[in-house]
Image (spheres, rainbow, N blue to C red):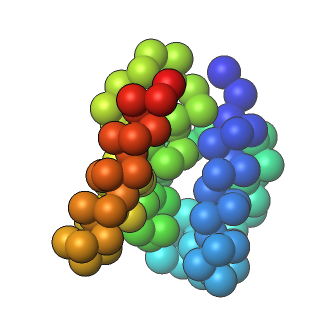
Amino acid sequence: MDFKQGGQAIQRIRKELGMTQEQLAEITNVASNSISRIERGLLMPALPTLIEICNALGIGADSILSAYITQDTPIRWTPLAEKLGELDLEKQHKIETILNCLIRTI
């Protein structure tokens, strides 16, 4: 299995956070050239390293691994649930109403 999509996800999120590869390497105690290889899909990180990277980026592993999961699972909804949880209750109710309308029309 190649890790190209996972590496691209790590790179995208790292850049969105305004973090350099060197900063991520320092936080995770992983060599910066290894971070580069991971982001380019040339190196698949070991599970402890992936966990360190996810913790450093403040994300769940599903943000990185969802491209490799072929079964629909509730874990794919985690990023959406987190975003909804950040909204006030009134906005959550509005989004729920919109989703219910969408579901009825599909």
Between 32 and 102, the residue placed more toward the observer is 102
| 33 up-or-down from 65: above or below | below
Between 70 and 5, the residue placed more toward the observer is 70
**Residue drawn 48% across the image and 76% down it:** 27
Q: Quadrant of residue 24?
A: bottom right
Q: Residue furthest top?
A: 71
| 75 up-or-down from 61: above or below | above
Q: Quadrant of residue 58?
A: bottom left
**Residue drawn 25% across the image and 61% down it:** 93
Horizontally, residue 99 falls left or right of residue 10, namely left
Horizontally, residue 66 falls left or right of residue 34, namely left
Whether residue 28 is visible, yes or no, is: no
Horizontally, residue 96 falls left or right of residue 56, namely left
Between 99 and 40, the residue placed more toward the observer is 99
Residue 3, image x, y percentages: 68, 35
Q: Quadrant of the N terminus?
A: top right
Q: Residue furthest left?
A: 89
| 75 up-or-down from 25: above or below | above
Residue 8, image x, y percentages: 72, 50
Residue 61, image x, y percentages: 42, 46
Whether residue 66 is visible, yes or no, is: yes
**Residue drawn 69% across the image and 61% down it:** 11
| 57 up-or-down from 66: above or below | below
Count of numbered labels shown in the rendering: 0
Residue 70, image x, y percentages: 52, 17
